[in-house]
Image: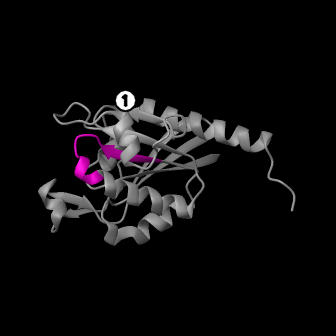
Amino acid sequence: MEIMRLVVTGPVGAGKSTFIRSVSEIDVVDTDRRATDEASLLKPKTTVAFDFGRLQFSPDMALHLYGTPGQARFDFMWDILIRRAHAYMLLVAAHRPREFHYARRILSFMQRRSRAPLIIGLTHTDQPGTWDEENILIALGFPNPDRHPPIVSVDATEAGSVAVAIMTLLQHYSQVQQRNVEQPAPHR
């Protein structure tokens, strides 16, 4: 059986744990603990190592979903999880622009360690003060409207919305794989 490892990352409170819980076919393995720092302003518990969920995608393929902790002090877990990822999604709470710079920092960290395909998932888009996609992409370091990863709005509490986001990530992964086959690396 083929196993595909998908990583869900982003700032504290972006919806990573909820995203995985919404579609996992197993009880999610989590490492939530009482938040004792600035994370406690957003929620009572926070992930300190990772979340793990599983989704049987087909008889021959299972998706393993790994959610990273959102706090920089746990970046050693970001490193461990991204290095084996087939693809990943950066979740960004679209109504909290003060966190966009931090989301960009997470993105930079991941991109320095992995060439895995990426999509951006916007959460909390129904909240007051939500920024539009174009401005969020600029804040994340993608000023060119023609050159950015796929972006989707996702309600992490709804399994159907999460499934659409996962399908978008898998399609993007397949497209990147196909381009890599069609354009082999130059000989040295």
Q: Is residue 162 visible?
A: no
91 shown above or below 172: below
Q: Which sits in the foreground, 114 or 163?
A: 114
Residue at horizontal 46 percent and vertical 59 percent from the top: 108
Where does residue 37 sit, x and y in percent of width and height? 16, 68
Q: Is residue 141 visible?
A: yes
Q: Residue 32 lies in magenta, yes or no?
A: no
Residue at horizontal 31 percent and vertical 51 percent from the top: 100
Where does residue 139 sit, x and y in percent of width and height? 36, 47
Q: Which sits in the foreground, 172 or 33?
A: 172
Q: Which residue is mark 1?
A: 161
Where does residue 120 sit, x and y in percent of width and height? 43, 42
Q: Is residue 44 left or right of residue 101?
A: left
Label 1 neighbourhood size at 10 Å, few (<14), some (14-19), many (20+)? Answer: some
| Coloring applied to the structure | one colour
Where does residue 176 sit, x and y in percent of width and height? 65, 41
Residue at horizontal 18 percent and vertical 36 percent from the top: 129
Q: Quadrant of the C terminus?
A: bottom right
Q: Amino acid type of disc 1?
A: Ser
The span shown in magenta is 89-99
SS category of the residue bearing label 1? helix
Residue that sits furthest to the front in the current view: 144
Residue at horizontal 54 percent and vertical 34 percent from the top: 146
Q: How many marks?
A: 1
